[in-house]
Every structure is written in structure tokens, then in C-alpha cells.
Amino acid sequence: MARRFIGSLIPLLALAVGEVIAGLTLRFNIELLLVYPVLMIVIPGLMDLRGDVYGAIGYRLTTALHIGAAEPRLFTRFNMVNTLTGYTVSLIVSLELCFMGLVLSYMLNLGSMDPVSLVFVVTTSTIIVFLVLNPIVLTSVIMLFKKGVDPSGFVAVVVTGVGDALTPLTLILVSLMYQVIPFIVRLLFVLGVLASLAISYLYLARIHEDKSVKENAVSSIIATSGSSLGGLFAAISIEGLLSRVPEVLGVLPAFNALIGASMGHLGNMLNIELHVKGSADTRRYRRESLLEAIATFISILAAYTVILATSVPGMLTVSTLSITISFILVYSLSAVTTFYLTTTSFKHGWDPDNIVFPLMTTFADFTGYLSTLLILGLVI
């Protein structure tokens, strides 16, 4: 039991490192978020998108290497198609999140940039993360495969952590600098991005490699939209609650991501048991859920401690109580949902691994923001 606990704790602590960077970026740029709450809407969706896209890139390559469909080299036709697929999906979903952010901002009278500037900021951030993360994923998967190590663990933890750290960092940096760039340059850049997206998709369609784009784009749009709806609650609360208790804003990326990762782990363990035994042991699932809950909460507290150590807390007791109560509620609800989602999808002949992790990370994003802010409002 101790070994299983440590095996759960170490990857979660590793993931927490990236989430702390994301949280600190938000925490120390709350003035910008007060001016442009629309950024708080798109950031959770973009963070979710990184995991969806680069996780898919890594898993596609891992599967292809295992079945012999790709060679363990960087410059291959498979990696070119894989890269173009990731680039295309990233831009499609980024544009959808911009549209969603603009519509919600207009409807709720929240501060936003003009449409061209928002698309410029979001797509620039997306392309920067793509240029950094894509070669890291491809190179690392190939190196690990050559050494006889299964790259799946790397893809699940490192890709999510690095993607989550880079997303708010690049988005905030571009948001701080975009006004010094002439509007015509921003417009030409956006038009260039749209042209590159069209060319990329048309090329993939021409060589009959656009199926992955359609599948990945649809699932990513659904998942990222759910995450951004969670961010909407933060955008609405940024001027009131979160500006008074900024440490909560800093810890929320870790809070949501760690619970989502735990549900992926629980779902995978349950899926294996269902495939091996044909049925689920509910008593064993409760024990595993409890161990995972302790490891997850320790990791959240570790991230929270770093956030507190780097800034002056607004209301320490209030924020700690809110995070603790919210964790109990969100984790318990997520664990129950994961169990029924995994067993139900298995009974219908679907692979739970393709369903549970994407849905539960979105579920954690949405309920994490909603419950924490509601409880924070009640406690204050």
C-alpha cells in the first residue's frame, strides 16, 4: 500500500511544479486580468488544449512506434503528419476559444480586447507553445522508446505540466506587449495564421490524413469549452473575491489539474480491472480513491505553500478553509463520476481510457472553479 501511495504521489508532485508556475503567473498579473477578464475565460481552455493536443501527439507516436507504423527517428513522414495535425487542431480550437471568450465577455459586459488583438494574443501564444513543446514531445518519446522505456508516463505528466506552465506565461507576456505592435501588423499576422491553418488542413486532406484532425478537434472543442466555462466563474469573480484573496487564484490551476490527473489514474486502474476480471471491486476502488485523495491533497497543499511563500496572503484562514472544503466536494464527486463513467463505458463496449480522462479533466476544471468560488463567497 505504501508503494502504491508513493507511486501516486511522485507524479502528482511533478505535475504540481508546472501548475505552480501557471498559478504564480496568474497571481502576479491580477491587475492585467482585472482589465481583461476575457483572458481568464480563455486561459483554462487553452491549458486544457495543450494536454489534448500534445498528449494526442505523444500517444499517436507511442502507439505507432510500438506497432511498427513509425520509425524511431525525428524526421519521418509520420512525424510530419503528426506535427501538422497538432498545429491544425491547436489553431482551430484556439480560434473557437477566442470566439467563445468574446461572446461571453460581450454578454456579461466583461473587459476584453478588440477581436483582432485577442486572436493575435491567443494564436501567438499557441504558436510559441507549439514551437517549444512539439519538438520536446517528439524527441523525448523517441529517446525513451529507444531506451526501452514506455513513453506513456512521460506524456501524461510532463506534457501536461509543461503545457500548463507555458500557456498562461506566454499568453500574459504577449498580452503585456501587444499594444506596442501596430494594429496593421497584428491584423496581417492574424491573416497569415488563418492562411497557414487553411494550407495545413487542405494538405492533410489532400493526402487523406485529416481524420485525426476531425476527431481531435471535436473532442478538444468540447473539452476546452467546458474548461473555459469554469474560467468564466473566475472572470466574473476577478474584481471581487479573487482580488481580495489572490492566493486562491494562484492555487486553482494546481487544484484542478491534480484532481483531473488523479481521476485519469483511477479510471485507468479500474479499466484494467474490468478488462482482467470483467467486474469492478467497489471496496478496492474506495481504498484506491482514498489513497489517491491523500496524495492529491498533499500535492495541492505543496503547490499552495509555494504560492503563499512567494506573496503576502490576502486571507489565509479563509483561503485554506475554502480550498479544503472544495477539495472534499470536488474530489468526492469526481471519484464517484469516474467510477460510473468507467464502468458504463466498459459495458457499452467503449474504451474508457479514451473517454474518462478527457471528460474528467474538463469536469475538474469546471467544478473546481465553481465550487471553490462559491465556497469562498460563503466563507467571506
Image: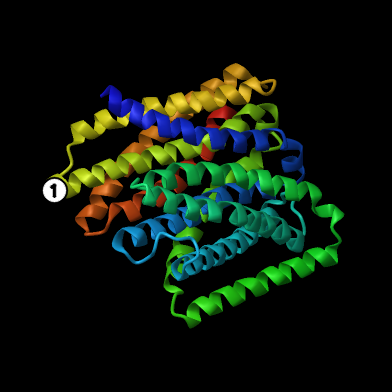
The residue sitting at 22% across, 58% down in the picture is 348
The residue sitting at 73% across, 62% down in the picture is 115
For the N terminus, the quadrant is top left
SS type, badge 1: loop
The residue sitting at 86% across, 53% down in the picture is 180
Mark 1: few, some, or many residues within 10 Å (few <14, many ≥20)?
few
Q: Is residue 147 above or below residue 89?
A: above
Q: Which residue is mark 1?
A: 278
Relative to 58, 253 lies left or right:
right
Q: Is residue 50 above or below residue 238?
A: below
| Residue 3 point in image, percent of width and height | 29, 25
Q: Looking at the rendering, which quadrant does residue 193 occupy? A: bottom right
| Residue 192 point in image, percent of width and height | 71, 71
- Mark 1: which amino acid? Gly
The extreme left residue here reads 277
Q: Is residue 356 above or below residue 293?
A: below
The residue sitting at 55% across, 37% down in the picture is 18
| Residue 309 point in image, percent of width and height | 63, 20
Residue closest to the eye, 11 or 147: 147
The extreme top residue here reads 317
Please say whether residue 272 is visible from this viewpoint.
yes
| Residue 310 point in image, percent of width and height | 67, 23
Coloring scheme used: rainbow
Residue closest to the eye, 109 or 223: 223
